[in-house]
């Protein structure tokens, strides 16, 4: 089992609308800590209800404060 951090983030699943949390990130320096999403390059999880894979990856280092999500690309793989 690899080391990872928990990411303090939740959304509605784009497929089923279920609350999705439990995002993880594999950091270079941490292990089993709570981090903010804007502090990591990538974070991901799977919806517990419909098993849709949701992943965010930073596309730039231009952190824009309150609008930090604009700095990330979201990839969704629908399952089922």
Image (cartoon, helix red, strand yellow):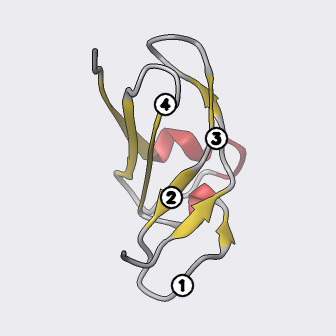
* Dot 2 and dot 3 residues touching (CB under 8 Å): no
Residue, disc 2 = 24
Q: Quarter holding the C terminus?
A: top left
Q: Label 4, on which residue?
A: 47
Marking on residue 30:
1
Query: What label sits on residue 60 in the rendered view?
Result: none
Residue occupying image coordinates x 58% and y 13%: 17
- The x and y percentages for residue 29 are 49, 89
Q: Residues within 10 Å of mark 2 (few under 14, many from 20)?
A: many
**Which secondary structure, mark 4?**
loop
Query: Of marks 1 and 3, which one's residue comes earlier in the chain?
Result: 1
In the rendered image, the residue lying farthest to the top is 16
Relative depth, front residue between 12 and 71: 12
| Gap between marks 1 and 4 measured at Cα | 24 Å
Q: Nearer the viewer, residue 69 or 12?
A: 12
In this view, the mark in front (4 or 3): 4
Instruction: Tell which of 21 and 61 is nearer to you.
Output: 21
* Tag 1 and tag 4, C-beta contact below 8 Å: no
Q: CA distance from mark 2 to mark 3?
A: 21 Å
- Where disc 1 sits, the SS reads loop
Residue at (66% x, 61% y) in the render: 36
Q: Say which element carries label 3.
A: helix
Q: Separation of disc 1 and disc 3 at Cα?
A: 25 Å
Please provide percent x and percent y for residue 57: 37, 51
Say which residue label 3 marks: 67
> Mark 4 vs mark 3: which is more N-terminal?
4
Indicate left or right for 43 with 32 as reference.
left
On screen, residue 77 versus residue 47, left or right, reads left
Helix, strand or loop at disc 2?
Answer: strand
């Amino acid at each position: 089992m690899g080391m990872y951090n928990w990411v303090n983030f939740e959304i509605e699943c784009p497929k089923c609308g279920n609350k999705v949390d439990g995002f993880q990130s594999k950091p270079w320096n941490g292990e089993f800590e709570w981090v903010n999403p804007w502090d990591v390059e990538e974070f991901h999880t799977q919806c517990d209800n419909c098993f849709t894979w949701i992943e965010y990856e930073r596309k730039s280092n231009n952190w824009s404060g309150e609008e930090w999500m604009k700095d990330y690309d979201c990839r969704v793989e629908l399952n089922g």
